[in-house]
Image (cartoon, grey):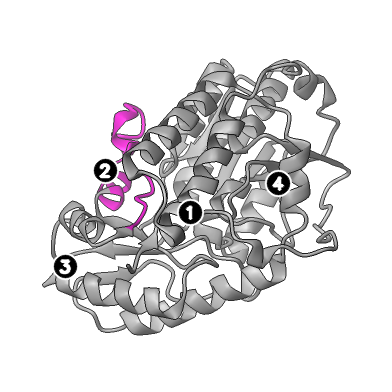
Amino acid sequence: MIFVGGELYFDEHWQIDKVYPFPQTREFNYFLNGGQACLRVIGDYLVAHNIDKILLPAYLCPTISRTFSECRLRLDYYRINEDFSIDLHDLAAKAAVQAQAIYFINYFGFTHAKHEQDYLQDLQKQGRIVVEDNAQAGFSEIPIGDFVFNSMRKFVPYDGAYLNAFCSMYRYINAYRGRLNHRLPLIRQYRSGLSRYLFQDEGDREELVALFEQAETFYEKDQVVLGDIQEKACIEHLDWQGIRQVRYENYAYLLKQLNGIPGVLPIFPTLQENNMPMGLPIFINRISRDMVNAFLGDHQIGLTIHWEHMHENPMTSVQKLAMEMADRILTLSIDQNTHRTQLDYLLEQLKIALN
């Protein structure tokens, strides 16, 4: 059976004996439960320092808006262009009168152009707090945010996130101490079961799906902030250089093969040096994206839409361009568990779906 994409599963191939040297980019560094945990303590910090409003990109995961709202922050949004660059005119107009905190995303592992980064740093010099979201980028070698965080489960089958901060966050993290992580045993069971299901033909697919959905429900409800020591040890004993290299090579190969396919437009047609792409996002232009995705799903290809539920947010749904982008986008798998045979199968089925 050939399959492509889906959730990440345990693979001992990537384990190494020594600890990988993660960059310490700020004075204060923390390992938390996930990206949502980072959002929560950043939101708590802002409110505690009388910052009641944050300016967000119009194209974003709805979880970001929901989490900041739960922290009692007011939200507004600046436009993102079709190539996922920042609409600096819109950002400048809104930052001038509205927001003491600015949030930006390094989409799919790609950093913004220098002039965009320079403008964000100018806002910092004016006293604005800048939050850098690397959930889709892993580790940025030259981060610029006052707060910089990532999300490990986007890249490996482990839970956790690294938060780098310009100040001590102990007070805000400690407020969540003692919360029980109901998700962790379930997601570990799921990831282990998924590997056996895919490679040993053991287990039941419906039971695995139910297990995953239950784990995701607890992730939302438990509001666990502290990271798990065992997950951290697993993350830090992975061959991250190898993971980065395979993702880079898979992206480059897939990008070349996509060239000239009618109806497909790669959003990032040039790989940046040393970046670790999360996936290869494309726009589907001639046919319904949902029809294409459904066809691929019927052929054991599980891809992701970033983000399916954007339309549910009444504040971002008025952003016409962002909604049009969300209707056409599809993220192709290029992760470290994906081999050349699987990429070729993905390409073959994508061409059939488009025709």
Task: State which tag comes first along the sequence, 3 or 2.
Answer: 2
Q: Residue 100 carries which label?
A: none
Looking at the image, is mark 1 or mark 2 earlier in the sequence? 1
Residue wearing tag 4:
145
| Residue 294: x %, y % from top left | 20, 54
Residue at 81% in and 28% down: 169
Element on which disc 2 rests: helix
Mark 3 or 4: the one toward you: 3
- On the image, the x and y values in percent for residue 51 come to 66, 22
**x and y percentages locating residue 148 in the rendered image:** 70, 45
Task: Tell me the kind of residue under disc 2.
Answer: Lys
Q: Per the image, is 316 magenta?
A: yes
Q: Mark 2 points at which residue?
A: 320
Q: Is residue 79 magenta?
A: no
Alpha carbon distance from label 3 to label 2: 27 Å
| Lower position in the chain sequence, tag 1 or tag 3 | 1
- Badge nearest the viewer, 3 or 2: 3
For the C terminus, the quadrant is: bottom left
Query: Gap between marks 1 and 3, in whole Å?
Result: 29 Å
Identify the image quadrant of residue 2.
bottom left
Of the numbered discs 2 and 4, the one sitting upstream in the chain is 4
Compared to 15, does 58 lie above or below?
A: above
Q: Would you name the residue on which mark 1 appears?
A: 196
Q: Distance between the residues labelled 3 and 4?
A: 41 Å
For the residues labelled 3 and 4, say whether their Cβ atoms are less than 8 Å apart.
no
150 on left or right of 324: right
> Which residue bears the numbered disc 3?
353
- Magenta-highlighted residues: 302-326
Density class for disc 1 (Cα within 10 Å; few <14, some 14-19, many ≥20) is: some
Eye-nearest disc, 1 or 4 = 1
Q: Which of marks 1 and 2 is in front?
A: 1
**Label 1 or label 4, whichever comes before in sequence order:** 4
